[in-house]
Image: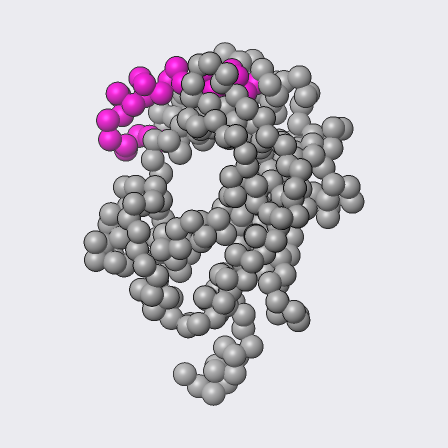
C-alpha cells in the first residue's frame, strides 16, 4: 500500500473503508442480532436465501398493496398474494405441500389487514416505479464532516391527511410490547418523516397474525427517543468495528459464528465458505 493510499485510508470512516455507502434499519438490526450473518452479507457480499416464512409475509404485503394503491377488492388482493407466493417459491422444497398449507393463512391475513386499513382511505402513492415511499436521512455517529452515513428506508403506507405511518407485519406471535428491532424501525421512520415534513407523525404497526382468534394487533410508537439512542449506539459500534481493519475477510473471521439464529436457515453454503461449518 502506497503512502498516499495509507493517508487516504486514515481519513476514511469505517463505512467508507469498506465501500458501504448507506445503511438501513434492517441491516443495523441484523448487525446487533446476528453480526456474523451481517458481516457475510454486507462485507462478504453473499446473498442469503429467503425461506417460506419470509415469502409468505411478502405475499401478504403484495396483496394488500395491490388493493390499497389500486382500489382492488379483497378477492383480487388474495389471488394476487397467492400468485406471488407461487412465483417466488418456484425453487423451494416441498412446494405443493407448503402452498396448500399457506394459502388459507395468506388469504386470511390479507382480508384482516384490508379490513383494518381500508377505513383509513387510500394511502399516498409512492413515486412512479417504486413500491414504497423512500426515506433518506443522514445518521451521525461521530463529530466532524466525516461523521455521518446515509440511511435509506422504505415506508409501507403513508397517510398525509392523518399524519400517519402504518407498517404491516405478519407473524405467528402476538406482540405485547415493542421489540427492540421494531421499536427502532418505528422511531427512525417517525424521525425521518418529521425531518422531511416538519411535523412528527403518528407511527403504528399493524400485526396480522396466523391465528384465527384475535387475528391482529395494533402497536403505536410513543417513546421514540429511547429507541433512537439505541439505534445510534449500534451504528457507532458498526463503524468502530469496520474501522479496525480494511480487510473484510479478517473482520468476518473475527466474529463468532452462531448457526442457531434464523438468519442462517438454508444458508449452510455461506457458513461453509466463511466459517468452515
Q: Is residue 257 above or below residue 73?
A: below
Q: Is residue 150 above or below residue 110?
A: below
Q: How many marks?
A: 0
| Residue 104 within the magenta-colored segment of the rendering | yes
Which residues are the magenta region?
88-114
| Residue 77 within the magenta-colored segment of the rendering | no
Q: Is residue 251 above or below residue 33?
A: below
Q: Residue at x 37, y 31 (%)?
A: 53
Q: Residue at x 52, y 79 (%)?
A: 10
Can residue 127 be seen?
no
Q: Residue at x 51, y 43 (%)?
A: 181
Q: Nearer the viewer, residue 16 or 230?
A: 230
Q: Quadrant of the N terminus?
A: bottom left
Q: Nearer the viewer, residue 223 or 79?
A: 223
- Measured from the top left, where is residue 178 in percent x and y? 55, 37
Please give left or right for residue 224 compared with residue 52 in the image. Answer: right
Q: Please name the predominant secondary structure of the magenta segment in the image.
A: helix
Q: Nearer the viewer, residue 8 or 29?
A: 29
Q: Residue at x 50, y 12 (%)?
A: 75
Q: Quadrant of the C terminus?
A: bottom left
Q: Residue at the far bottom: name it.
A: 3
Can residue 209 be seen?
yes
Please give left or right for residue 19 compared with residue 191 in the image. Answer: left
- Measured from the top left, where is residue 132 in percent x and y? 58, 36
Q: How is colour applied across the structure in the image?
A: one colour
Quadrant position of residue 164:
top right
Q: Residue at the far right: name it.
A: 198
Please give left or right for residue 54 compared with residue 239 in the image. Answer: left
- Measured from the top left, where is residue 146 in percent x and y? 62, 69
Please give left or right for residue 138 compared with residue 82 in the image. Answer: right
- Measured from the top left, where is residue 64 in percent x and y? 53, 23
Amino acid at each position: 500500500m502506497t503512502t498516499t493510499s495509507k493517508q487516504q485510508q486514515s481519513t476514511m470512516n469505517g463505512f467508507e473503508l469498506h465501500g458501504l455507502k448507506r445503511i438501513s434499519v434492517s441491516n443495523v438490526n441484523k448487525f446487533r442480532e446476528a453480526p456474523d450473518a451481517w458481516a457475510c452479507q454486507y462485507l462478504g457480499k453473499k446473498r442469503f436465501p429467503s425461506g417460506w416464512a419470509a415469502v409468505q409475509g411478502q405475499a401478504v404485503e403484495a396483496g394488500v398493496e395491490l388493493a390499497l394503491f389500486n382500489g382492488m377488492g379483497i378477492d383480487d388482493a388474495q389471488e394476487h398474494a397467492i400468485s406471488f407466493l407461487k412465483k417466488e417459491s418456484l425453487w423451494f422444497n416441498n412446494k405443493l405441500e407448503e402452498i396448500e398449507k399457506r394459502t388459507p393463512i395468506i388469504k386470511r391475513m390479507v382480508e384482516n389487514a384490508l379490513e383494518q386499513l381500508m377505513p383509513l382511505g387510500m394511502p399516498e402513492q409512492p413515486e412512479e416505479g417504486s413500491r414504497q415511499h423512500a426515506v433518506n436521512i443522514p445518521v451521525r455517529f461521530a463529530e466532524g464532516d466525516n461523521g455521518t452515513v446515509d440511511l435509506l428506508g422504505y415506508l409501507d403506507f403513508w397517510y398525509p391527511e392523518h399524519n400517519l405511518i402504518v407498517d404491516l407485519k405478519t407473524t405467528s406471535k402476538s406482540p405485547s410490547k415493542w421489540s427492540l428491532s421494531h421499536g427502532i424501525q418505528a422511531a427512525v421512520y417517525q424521525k425521518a418523516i418529521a425531518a422531511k415534513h416538519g411535523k412528527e407523525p403518528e407511527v403504528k404497526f399493524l400485526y396480522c397474525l396466523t391465528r384465527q382468534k384475535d387475528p391482529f394487533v395494533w402497536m403505536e410508537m410513543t417513546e421514540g427517543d429511547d429507541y433512537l439512542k439505541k439505534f445510534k449506539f449500534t451504528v457507532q459500534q458498526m463503524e468502530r468495528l469496520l474501522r479496525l481493519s480494511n480487510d473484510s475477510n479478517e473482520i468476518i473471521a473475527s466474529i463468532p459464528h452462531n448457526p442457531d439464529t434464523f438468519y442462517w436457515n438454508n444458508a449452510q453454503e455461506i457458513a461453509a465458505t466463511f466459517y468452515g461449518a
